[in-house]
Amino acid sequence: MSMMGELNFFLGLQIKQCQEGIYISQSKYTKELLKKFGIDASRPDILHAVCLCARFQSNPKESHTSAVKRIFRYLKGTIQYGLFYPKNENFCLKGYSDSDCAGNIDDNKSTSGSCQFLGDCLVFWFSKKQNCVSLSTTEAEYISAAFCCTQLLWMKQTLADYKCTFGNVPIFCDNISAINTQDQLADIFTKPLSSETFASIRARLSIMHIE
């Protein structure tokens, strides 16, 4: 290891440090991605769309190619967007869990989505089709919540090594009849959303334009 001064670029990530906090973006990588026509950008706001398209990469149809082009058009319009990690003393640990019950029309499997926050900072996000067919909305939600719980327990144990201890860690999971979808941040990882809801959740995940 060597001291190379202030961290500005690391493993494809651009880092900008300021008094308010830290911005992390992939604008340079995204520009190169658009040139190469690849699709590996690790942006939380495109995770669900990328995962859906990846399921058909072995035998893509014209509709899948059109979907990928839509992702590229979105990336082109949001090249300067990145994650903002604010500098504050809020150091609570929490998670959001959601599922799209039987959302896959090919095999009726559900999609699990979750994200975990340390204070106001998004530190982990996940979107994946479940391995089995859920027989009810409750079962699909339970599978997603179980994964979210596992991730939070791992984070809690890891942070304990750094003398950071937590009591009860909340997990926010929802049922459409019990909570408004705008309050469930994990929705962005499990299902298509209206442009207004998508933009609202994106902002609450601290994904914003970086000057």
Image (cartoon, rainbow, N blue to C red):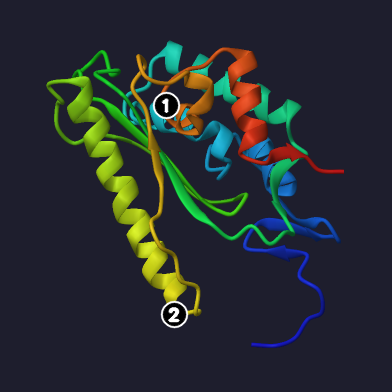
Residue farthest toward the bottom in the current orientation of the protein: 2
Q: CA distance from mark 2 to mark 1?
A: 38 Å
Amino acid beneath label 1? Cys
Task: Give the foreground label among 2 and 1.
Answer: 2
Q: Quadrant of the N terminus?
A: bottom right
Rate crowding at label 2 as few (under 14), some (14 to 19) or many (20 or more) other CA atoms within 10 Å: few
Q: Is residue 38 visible?
A: no
Q: Position of residue 144 (x, y in %)?
A: 29, 38
In the image, residue 23 sits, relative to residue 163, either above or below, namely above
Q: Position of residue 127 (x, y in %)?
A: 39, 37
In the image, residue 14 sits, relative to residue 49, either above or below, namely below
On residue 101, the disc is none
Residues tagged 2 and 1 counted as in contact (Cβ below 8 A): no
Lower position in the chain sequence, tag 2 or tag 1: 1
Q: Quadrant of the C terminus?
A: top right
Q: Residue at x 64, y 15 (%)?
A: 196
14 sits to left or right of 90: right
Q: Position of residue 175 (x, y in %)?
A: 33, 22
Pointer 1 residue: 53
Amino acid beneath label 2? Asp
Q: Residue at x 64, y 24 (%)?
A: 200
Rate crowding at label 1 as few (under 14), some (14 to 19) or many (20 or more) other CA atoms within 10 Å: some
Q: Residue at x 55, y 45 (%)?
A: 42
Q: Position of residue 36 (x, y in %)?
A: 62, 39
Q: Nearer the viewer, residue 5 or 153?
A: 153
Labels in figure, total? 2
Pointer 2 residue: 161
Circle 2 sits in a helix, a strand or a loop, which is it? loop
Q: Is residue 141 visible?
A: yes
